[in-house]
Image (cartoon, grey):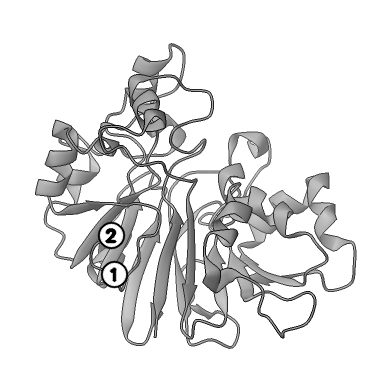
């Protein structure tokens, strides 16, 4: 049976954010008003509950693995073993790749990524830790628009081109290849299809078509408004400047996808500044009335309510 789990649903820094004392983070820490803590974004998929594949690799990955028994080493499987059969990287953003370094305990891993993402990571000396023994890390190149199978499972992924370039730490690198810096994923198995796009710089027609083919879409819910960060801290960039379409406004995600007829529409990668985290906020009500679920850690495709 196809399983799709969200192990974390927050943007970088988590919720509450480690260095933030805003009212929303403070209320979450106090455990009041129904504000639920969230770990940084992480998803996992399986079609047999034995082999699991991670979609990206969160900085919170170790905690997320320990919190989910299906991802623990198997008793009787040898001293060192793991049900994690591979990792799919959709970009080279630190929030999506740092978890790889937590999986460096001489454990053989298969990593699926575009050639550009691989090249970007291997240019950083930290990632030499993943090559201390032969076959510790095996790369499988993926290309936008070309479906690929996850190992020997029955799960197929098809990358969807997203606008945008490499992250800030690699901006000096000339890409030269369109559609390799960031991709979304359509993940399918057992006749079911899920779109996974936690970072959306632009809602293209290709992306709309991918969404329309799915029974569930997990979509960038980072910011409610374009100026959200600027209002929180002067000098910070707008949502769109760092590659996220905001939810509100005539040109925001809720409006642009208002006609999307999909059974389950879920907002993930939610920043600590986003008022949809507050179940009593007008913004939360607006998102829910527009047909969207607010993603929480532990969300599952096969589970209707948490």
Residue 14, compared with residue 194, is above or below; it is above
The residue at 31%/28% (across/down) is 226
Q: Look at mark 2 in the image and give the residue it sits on.
A: 306
Q: For label 2, count other residues whose C-alpha is less than 10 Å away and answer few (under 14), some (14-19) or many (20+).
A: few
Q: For label 1, count other residues whose C-alpha is less than 10 Å away and answer few (under 14), some (14-19) or many (20+).
A: few
Alpha-carbon distance for marks 2 and 1?
A: 7 Å
Q: Nearer the viewer, residue 207 or 304?
A: 304
Q: Secondary structure at mark 1?
A: loop
* Quadrant housing residue 76: bottom right
Q: Is residue 185 visible?
A: no
Task: Name the quarter where the N terminus is drawn.
Answer: bottom left
Residue 99, compared with residue 275, is above or below; it is below
Give the residue furthest to the right.
133
Question: Cβ–Cβ below 8 Å for labels 2 and 1?
Answer: yes
Q: Look at mark 1 in the image and give the residue it sits on.
A: 303
Residue 190, compared with residue 17, is above or below; it is below
Q: Position of residue 37 (x, y in %)?
A: 41, 41
Q: Is residue 240 left or right of residue 44?
A: left
Give the residue furthest to the top.
234
Q: Is residue 175 visible?
A: yes
Q: Position of residue 182 (x, y in %)?
A: 51, 53
Q: Is residue 183 left or right of residue 304?
A: right
Q: Nearer the viewer, residue 298 or 269?
A: 298
């Amino acid at each position: 049976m196809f399983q799709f789990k969200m192990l974390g649903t927050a943007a970088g820094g988590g919720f509450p954010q480690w260095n933030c004392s805003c009212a929303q983070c403070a209320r979450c820490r106090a455990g009041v008003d129904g504000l639920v803590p969230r770990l940084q974004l992480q998803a996992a998929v399986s079609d047999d509950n034995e082999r699991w594949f991670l979609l990206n690799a969160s900085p919170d990955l170790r905690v997320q693995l320990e919190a989910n028994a299906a991802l623990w080493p198997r008793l009787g499987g040898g001293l060192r073993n793991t049900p994690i059969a591979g990792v799919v990287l959709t970009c080279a953003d630190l929030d999506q790749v740092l978890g790889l370094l937590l999986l460096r305990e001489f454990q053989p891993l298969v990593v699926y990524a575009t050639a550009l993402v691989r090249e970007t990571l291997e240019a950083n000396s930290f990632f030499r830790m993943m090559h201390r023994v032969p076959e510790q890390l095996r790369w499988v190149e993926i290309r936008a628009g070309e479906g690929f199978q996850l190992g020997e499972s029955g799960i197929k992924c098809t990358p969807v081109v997203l606008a945008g370039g490499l992250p800030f730490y690699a901006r000096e690198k000339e890409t030269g290849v369109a559609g390799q810096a960031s991709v979304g994923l359509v993940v399918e198995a057992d006749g079911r299809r899920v779109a996974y796009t936690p970072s959306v710089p632009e809602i293209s027609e290709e992306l709309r078509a991918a969404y329309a083919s799915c029974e569930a879409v997990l979509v960038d819910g980072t910011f409610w408004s374009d100026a959200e960060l600027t209002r929180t801290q002067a000098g910070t960039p707008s949502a769109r400047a760092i590659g996220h379409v905001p939810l509100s406004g005539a040109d925001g995600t809720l409006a642009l996808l208002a006609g999307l007829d999909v059974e389950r529409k879920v907002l993930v990668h939610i920043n600590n500044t986003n008022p949809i985290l507050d179940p009593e906020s007008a913004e939360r009500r607006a998102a829910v009335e527009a047909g969207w679920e607010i993603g929480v850690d532990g969300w599952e495709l096969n589970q209707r309510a948490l």
